[in-house]
Amino acid sequence: MKFIPLFSGSSGNSSLCIAGDTKLLIDAGMTGKAITNALCEVGIQPQELSAIVITHDHIDHTRGAGIMSRRYGIPIYANSGTWEVMCSCIGEIAPRNTRLFRTGEDFYIGNVNILPFPTPHDAAEPVGFTIIHAGRKLLYMTDIGCVHEAMLEQGKDAGLAFVEANHDVNMLKNGPYPYHLKQRILSNRGHLSNENCGKLLIKLHGLGVRSAILAHLSHENNTPETAFRSVVTILESESINDMNICVANRSSVTGIFEL
Ligand SMILES: [Zn+2]
Ligand SMILES: [Zn+2]
């Protein structure tokens, strides 16, 4: 299985997962043109996509979903809560390309097993995913205000964890955002701080995870260096030195990760 973050950050999110013949786009939060260009850059034609799977209804995860589906005939998979909000933003989708999954129930696209599990975030029905193919597991978990035990369990033995390191708490508190937005981001249904991401990775390390990509960084309240340094410092405070950590790029392909 190959995992390729195309875009990641508060301005737009989309990743590609290639598992055998199945090619999944996870979220489509940039314009159709930007996503198409990024796919071509990694040698994939958009019409080759098997499906677009959506974590939640926020525009930084859905912006290009409608245009990609209409232009290339790609089915979109989301739960009912997400469809309810998203359908008014992404335009008309052909009924045959409107696919529903249930939160907490796994399903297959091709021979790839996908489990959408609930996450705490201020969207209609947000989920993270585990994506399993040929005994390999990817944990995809961004836009999470906090981490519950049940979410941690999903990460057990994942070959790669794509997890949120949204903000540095001091940068956020001292930054330009209005008070209500700061409170929203800091809340249990907002976004995960670098510090809490580090704590999450300590627990995932205990569950066998050895590779992680830090994702969904805030443009205003974080930098790749700050996120990396914060997380590594927290891991080292627990004497964890055997975890591969990298930071997803905001507006370009991060790389191709084999798992
Ligand atoms: Zn969100
Ligand atoms: Zn987001």
Image: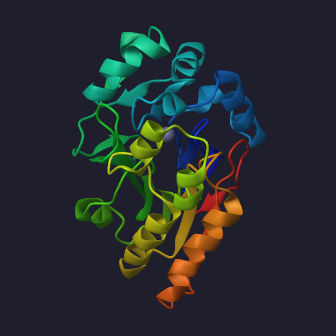
Residue 217 visible in the snapshot: yes
Residue 169 coordinates in the image, percent (x, y):
52, 59
Q: Which of 159/110 is in front?
A: 159
- The x, y position of residue 94, in whole percent, is 42, 10
Q: Is residue 100 left or right of residue 18?
A: left
In the foreground, 19 or 145: 145
* Callout count: 0
Task: Residue at the far right: name it.
Answer: 41
Q: Residue at x 33, y 27 (%)?
A: 82
Seen at 34% across and 57% down, the residue is 146
Rendered image coloring scheme: rainbow
Residue extending furthest toward the bottom: 239
Name the side, left or right, on which 133 lies relative to 172.
left
- In this rendering, position of residue 164 left or right of residue 31: left
Dividing the picture into quadrants, the one containing residue 213 is bottom right
Q: Residue at x 57, y 39 (%)?
A: 13
Say above or below: 180 vs 46: below
Q: Position of residue 12 (x, y in %)?
A: 60, 36
The quadrant of the rendering that contains the N terminus is bottom right
The answer to whether residue 246 is visible is no
Foreground of the two, 24 or 254: 254
Residue 69 location, x and y as percent? 52, 19
Residue 225 versus residue 251 in the image, above or below:
below
Quadrant in the picture for residue 244:
bottom right
If the image is split into quadrants, where does the C terminus sit? bottom right
